[in-house]
Each structure stands twice: as structure tokens, then as C-alpha cells.
Amino acid sequence: MNDFASAETPNDSIDEPSGADEFDFEAHRTAAESEYAGVRGLYEVFANKIHDILVDCFSAKGIQIYSATYRAKDIASFGNKAVKLAADNPQLPR
């Protein structure tokens, strides 16, 4: 018998919900939003800095910019994205 036949694949170690133990998408959303809220300010700073760098670079090359905007994803939108279904397993988030 082939030694590889009994080898564990990387996804075998992931705990997937069975019928009685379904994934709690709302708890996942809440946790994701809470964690993101703690770093969102940093993403705002990053977005602002990247905006400034791009504007400076274009200006240095004589390229006129009519509009340049930036933002960090809002918390509710991040939560919505966190609970989108995985394509390969709709019982889990992607």
C-alpha cells in the first residue's frame, strides 16, 4: 500500500461544523468587527499616507490630479465581508 494514502491533507486538520455544531457566523462577525475596530485607525493613517505619496509623485512628474480620495473600510462593511460564505464550503466564512 502507498504511504501517501493515509497521509493527512492540510484541510483535514480544520474543524468543520457537523450538523449539530454549526459555525456561528454572527459571533464571527462580532469578533472580526471588534478586532478590526482596534486597528482601523492605523489603516486610516496608512491610507492617508499612501494618498499623500501618490499625490506628491504625480505632482513631481507634472501630472495634474483632479481628484484623489482615500478611506479605510468602515467597520460594518468589514463585518459583512467577514461572514461571506466560502466558495468551497458554505458552512464556513471565506
Image (spheres, rainbow, N blue to C red):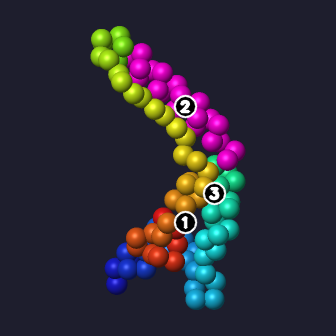
**Mark 1 or 2, nearer chain start:** 2
- Dominant secondary structure of the residues highlighted in magenta in the image: helix
* Dot 3: element: helix
Q: Is residue 56 above or below residue 79?
A: above
Q: How crowded is the residue under tag 2: few (<14 C-alpha within 10 Å), some, or many (20+)?
A: some
Residue 32 circle label: 3
* Dot 1: element: loop
Q: Quadrant of the N terminus?
A: bottom left
State which region is magenta.
37-57
Residue 77 screen position, x and y as percent? 55, 54
| Residue sitting at the far front | 66
**Residue of label 2:** 46
Q: Is residue 73 above or below residue 5?
A: above
Q: Nearer the viewer, residue 27 or 56?
A: 56
Magenta span includes 48? yes
Magenta span includes 68? no
Q: How crowded is the residue under tag 3: few (<14 C-alpha within 10 Å), some, or many (20+)?
A: some
How far apart marks 1 and 2 lie (CA) works out to: 25 Å
